[in-house]
Image (tube, helix red, strand yellow):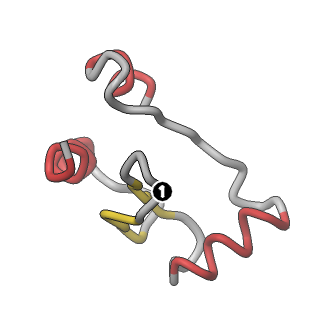
């Protein structure tokens, strides 16, 4: 994720969270994820993409990011 943030130079902010904290567990449940996932929000905080899973491929992540840029 850090590589994508650098690649998009200010147009993308990445935040990796501890999936086991109480707050993150609630967010994971609210998003309908099993244990991990990727959520992409627009600058206004609206959810644009959500992908369930812990082992998402780089291609899948890049496609998801590109779909909202």
Seen in the image, is 44 located left or right of residue 60? right
Q: Position of residue 8 (x, y in %)?
A: 27, 22
Q: Residue visible at 43% across and 59% down?
A: 39
Quadrant in the picture for the N terminus: top left
Local crowd at mark 1 within 10 Å, few (<14), some, or many (≥20)?
few
Depth order, front residue of 40/59: 40
Q: Residue furthest front?
A: 44
Image position of 8 with respect to 46: above or below: above
* Total labels drawn: 1
Image quadrant assignment for residue 35: bottom right
Image position of 12 with respect to 69: above or below: above
Q: Residue furthest right?
A: 22
Image quadrant assignment for residue 10: top left
Q: Residue visible at 41% across and 71% down?
A: 52
Q: Residue visible at 61% across and 72% down?
A: 28
Seen in the image, is 39 located left or right of residue 17? left
Q: Position of residue 56 (x, y in %)?
A: 34, 55
Q: Position of residue 21 (x, y in %)?
A: 82, 59
In the rendered image, which residue does mark 1 sit on?
45
Image quadrant assignment for residue 25: bottom right
Depth order, front residue of 9/38: 9
Seen in the image, is 38 located left or right of residue 68? right
Q: Position of residue 65 (x, y in %)?
A: 24, 45
Quadrant in the picture for the C terminus: top left
Q: Residue visible at 44% across and 24% down?
A: 2
The kind of secondary structure element at disc 1 is: loop
Image position of 32 with respect to 49: above or below: below
Image position of 56 with respect to 31: above or below: above
């Amino acid at each position: 994720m850090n590589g994508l943030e650098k690649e998009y130079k200010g147009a993308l902010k990445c935040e990796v969270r501890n999936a086991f904290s109480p707050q993150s567990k609630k967010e994971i449940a609210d998003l309908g994820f099993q244990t991990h996932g990727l959520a992409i929000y627009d600058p206004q905080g609206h959810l644009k993409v959500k992908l369930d899973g812990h082992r998402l491929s780089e291609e899948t992540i890049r496609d998801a990011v590109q779909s909202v840029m």
